[in-house]
Image (tube, coloured by chain):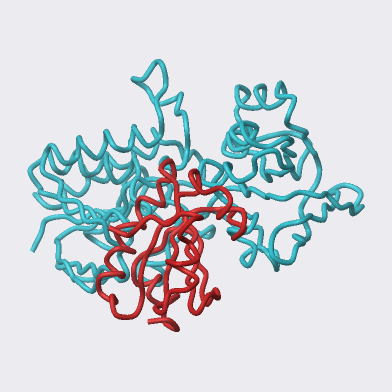
Amino acid sequence: MAKNVTAADFTAEVLNSEKAVLVDFWAEWCRPCHMVAPILDEIGAEYADKIEIVKVNVDEQPQLAAEYQITGIPAMKVFKGGKIVAEMVGAKPKHALLEDLAGVL
Amino acid sequence: MREVIIIGSGPAGYTAAIYTARAGLKPLMIASSVEPGGELMKTTEVENFPGFPNGLMGPDLMNSMQEQAERFGTEILFDDVTEVDLEGDVKKVTTGNGETFEARAVILATGAAYRELGLPREKELSGHGVSWCATCDGFFFREKNIAVVGGGDSAMEEAMFLTRFATKVYLIHRRDSFKASKTMVDRVLANDKIEIIYNSAISEINGEAKVESVVLENTVTGEKSDLDIEGLFIAIGSDPRVGLVQGKLDLSDDHFIKVEGRSSKTSVTGVFACGDVIDPTYRQAITAAGSGCVAALDAEHYLTA
């Protein structure tokens, strides 16, 4: 299971991470989020040396959702060296997510 | 080899699964990896499905259908079909993770996909103010001005649902009257937060990182005007999902899978189609379910003949 990140540890866990980090912005009531979560877990496990998957609950972390201008979920943003290097919106099948992540993995 | 593979998991797919499973055909359903349950998973209250006098939630209805299909032995795979080979007595179905399944019959219940406006910035701003799912994204438009475009029941439902969050919901429609049912239109007309903009089409979506405004074009006078909004929900109908079978099955002029008369028989023997992918007219949960039943009975007849 991907780790939950909050505003308090976002800098340490995401922005200062040496590895690429995919942040999955989600909410309990979002069905597509529940569909994509296990796919992200699989990707995280298969590419553990290249990318880490973490989750931000937008209900509990509205300031992070606002800061990253989230207007639809699931929204996935990949950070590397503190910068966003890839962005995806909406639940997608694994092969489509892997294509989107090709530059990172 | 299997007897029958069902592609799709909306009301048509699940009804086909329930019937073929009860007939002992041990169906394999390939339900999609991220959209199982189909369009009803994105709706809220379903009030017109017979047998539920108090209404029920779309996702609850679909979960019940899944449970009923599994009870009789349907095997469900949460993956996407990427390729089909429908010729001959053995049909082949390949999924996203590369597995190929064989069956004597295939039932296509792939439904319909949301239609896009076809405007330049639409795709880039998807997820940045442009949305096709009010129940998924409405939450992010609390105390904002937003718009819904469309004139059918789903546009009405989206507009009503979005008033929970938004300060104001504009409902933009090309004509001066709605295709939606009277019950839904009456609710929209009675809602103070909804303002209807008739005879208008969206000709541009503007905004750098996110939606800031749209340009409306009056469909009668051709006059243009700007409307400042932060969210645009598109509910202008859907198109049959026929990508998998393009060039393999006969399609109608408007791109639905062609079936023979009142049956579910496609142009290829042993391949049946049901639900929204064959229906340009009714497209209700209950008509899709009925159509799924037809496909199951046709497939059963074919397999036991």
Q: Is residue B201 left or right of residue B266?
A: right
The residue under the point 40% across, 70% down is A97
Residue B219, image x and y in percent? 83, 49
Residue B286 image position (x, y, % from top left): 39, 33
Q: Nearer the viewer, residue B78 or B260?
A: B78
Is residue B18 rendered to the left or right of residue B248?
A: left
Quarter of the picture holding the N terminus of chain B:
bottom left
| Residue B48 figure quarter | top left
Q: Position of residue B29 (x, y in %)?
A: 22, 53
Q: Residue furthest top?
A: B53
User: For chain B, what colour was chosen?
Assistant: cyan
Q: Nearer the viewer, residue B177 or B98?
A: B98
- Marks counted in the figure total 0
* Residue drawn at 81 percent across, 50 percent down: B228
> What residue is rendered at 33% in x and 51% in y?
B109
Q: Nearer the viewer, residue B33 or B241?
A: B33
Report whether residue A104 is seen.
Answer: yes
- State which chain is coloured red: A
Q: Position of residue A22 (x, y in %)?
A: 42, 68
Does A100 sit left or right of B232 as displayed? left
Q: Could one spot residue B305 in this view of the protein?
A: no
